[in-house]
Image (spheres, helix red, strand yellow):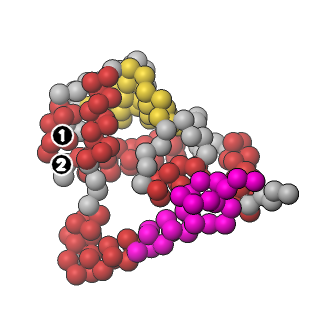
Amino acid sequence: MATQSPFSLVAGLVEQVGAGLQPPAWLISELQHRLVLFLNHVLMQEPEAQARLVRQKGQQIRLQWRNFALQLSATPAGLLELSDGSAEPALQLTITDTSPFGLVQTALRGDKPGVRIEGDVQLAAEVNWLADHVRWDAEEDLARVLGDVPAQALGRAARSAAQALQQFVLNRPGRGAGGDKAAS
């Protein structure tokens, strides 16, 4: 007799409740603007990323997950700006995994989520390069505010916590070797 994991029960409950909830439009807009500011902060630390985006200036990229969408445009400065969504995107990226818990597990494994890609192949290659090569150096940003030693200590603590969480998720009960579900 197969038993249901408490994790899958909670995930199912959150999925049902979350399907009926929709944040207000002002909150979504504010979060999108903050996300663009953060992405541009990270891009400004990588000149090669900016050079690649300069070549794609004006191109529209639409990111979609469930009923949430974000449309971005590459600027002449090699950064991103939020688009109003009225223009047809050159590239549409749709995350195929609808479960938030599935996305978190994928991220903790260090994998990319499943994505359906439609549109400009060259732009898709540039976005893939950005996803593979551009990383936020949180420790460097913390060092500007707190100093080098505290930033390094916080960085070590965060990496340790992330590793412990990753091990917990990958080795939790009801999972087989390698993180795959055990056969019933």
Would residue 151 be seen by someone viewing this image from the given angle? Answer: yes
Q: Are marks 2 and 1 in contact (CB under 8 Å)?
A: yes
What residue is rendered at 75% in x and 54% in y? 184
- Tell me the amino acid under the disc marked 1: Gln
Is residue 167 located in the magenta-colored stretch of the structure? yes
Q: Going by the picture, which residue comes out furthest to the top?
A: 88
Q: Is residue 103 left or right of residue 153?
A: right
What's the magenta region?
160-184
Position of residue 43 measured from the top left corner of the image (x, y, whole percent): 23, 46
Is residue 174 located in the magenta-colored stretch of the structure? yes
Position of residue 22 measured from the top left corner of the image (x, y, whole percent): 64, 42
The quadrant of the rendering that contains the N terminus is: bottom right
Residue neighbourhood size for the residue with mark 1, other residues' Cα within 10 Å, grouped as few (<14), some (14–19), many (≥20): many
> Label 2, on which residue?
46
Would residue 10 be seen by someone viewing this image from the given angle? Answer: no
Figure quadrant of residue 136 = bottom left
Position of residue 3 measured from the top left corner of the image (x, y, whole percent): 80, 59
